[in-house]
Amino acid sequence: MLKVGVLGAGHLGKIHLRLLNSSEKYTLIGFYDADAINGKKVVDEFGYNYFDNINTLIDAAEVVAIVTPTLSHFECAKKAMEKGKHVFIEKPITNTLEEAEELLTLEKQFGVKGQVGHVERFNPAFAAIKSQIHNPMFIETHRLAEFNPRGTDVPVVLDLMIHDIDAILSVVDSPVKQINASGVSVISQSPDIANARIEFENGCVANLTASRISLKNMRKSRFFQQDAYISVDFLEKKVEVVKMKDAPEQPGDFDMILQNAEGVKKQIYFENPDIVSNNAILDELETFADAINTNSTPIVSLAQGTKALKVALEIIESFKN
């Protein structure tokens, strides 16, 4: 079992502590939080071991889970990596692209592994269908959330949309060609609602919408590819798959047949992939342990987290144009 320590004991940090404490792949040594008063509250409520010095925790751990505000991700990760520790970093990987690229250098320099907490990769609905998403040519995503003051210190692109950016980059095997985007600040100092159009070199187009001032929550993505339409509901953990194949010579009474202008007949049919219930955060943490133990590439590597951040920052920059 890998000895793991957690940096940050806020809302998400407490979830990491609970899950790591229950994991059979880690031994939780404790946590550090810059707010000593909060640290004492967490100790009193849950009994986890509190380190009052960040370096002491890093020295005692083999793996460091960084669940601090984004602005401190880089410094925390750098401290840990320079001491030869593996790092799990909540999304986004860092605040700037330069910081992310420096972490990639440190990862190689010190021979450690890193994973970024893009948890939707482990959503059971997406995991059930990802292998069937082949060369999508149009993608549409909606990630809408009711207002919550937590997270409004960053643009909605880094708070919400980056989940969909990472998922899209994991299924589109092509460089980004062009980005056009707009964002509006309604309540926060940074944009609360945004729309982005990403064009890829292979002709794929992705249209992303994210809002944190909606009246209801929604997390849906739709993938359109040759002879298939795939809808993923990340919130409800459901998948709809509509496919087409050449129509049989003698269609059945209930077969759904379409005929195009050229006279080509296609049969529409539906698939319902098995969705295995899971705890996505626990899965991402435990697959990271597997990657360390087997010396393999983490499912969401620091390089992939950097690519997602790069696109997100380009979207934010597009707001100014």
Image: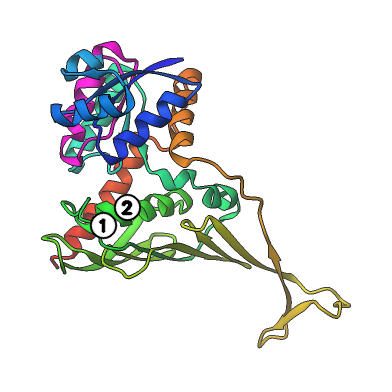
Which residues lie in the magenta part? 59-85
Quadrant of the image containing the C terminus: bottom left
Indicate whether 277 appears above or below 266.
above
From the top left corner, tell me how far across and down residue 76 is, in percent. 20, 27
70 vs 121, left or right, is left
Looking at numbered disc 2 in the image, what kind of residue is underneath it?
Ile
Label 1 SS? helix
What residue is drawn where x is 60% and y is 64%? 240
Q: Which residue is mark 2?
A: 162
Q: CA distance from mark 2 to mark 1?
A: 6 Å
Marks 1 and 2: in contact by CB < 8 Å?
Answer: yes
The verdict on residue 77 being magenta is yes
Label 2 SS? helix
307 vs 204, left or right, is left
From the top left corner, tell me how far across and down residue 227 is, in percent. 63, 68
Res. 312 in view? yes
Res. 115 in view? no
From the top left corner, tell me how far across and down residue 292 is, in percent. 44, 21
What residue is drawn where x is 49% and y is 35%? 283
Indicate whether 248 appears above or below 286.
below
From the top left corner, tell me how far across and down residue 320 is, in percent. 13, 65
Say whether disc 2 or disc 1 marks the residue closer to the N-terminus.
Answer: 1
Q: Which residue is mark 1?
A: 157
The verdict on residue 115 being magenta is no
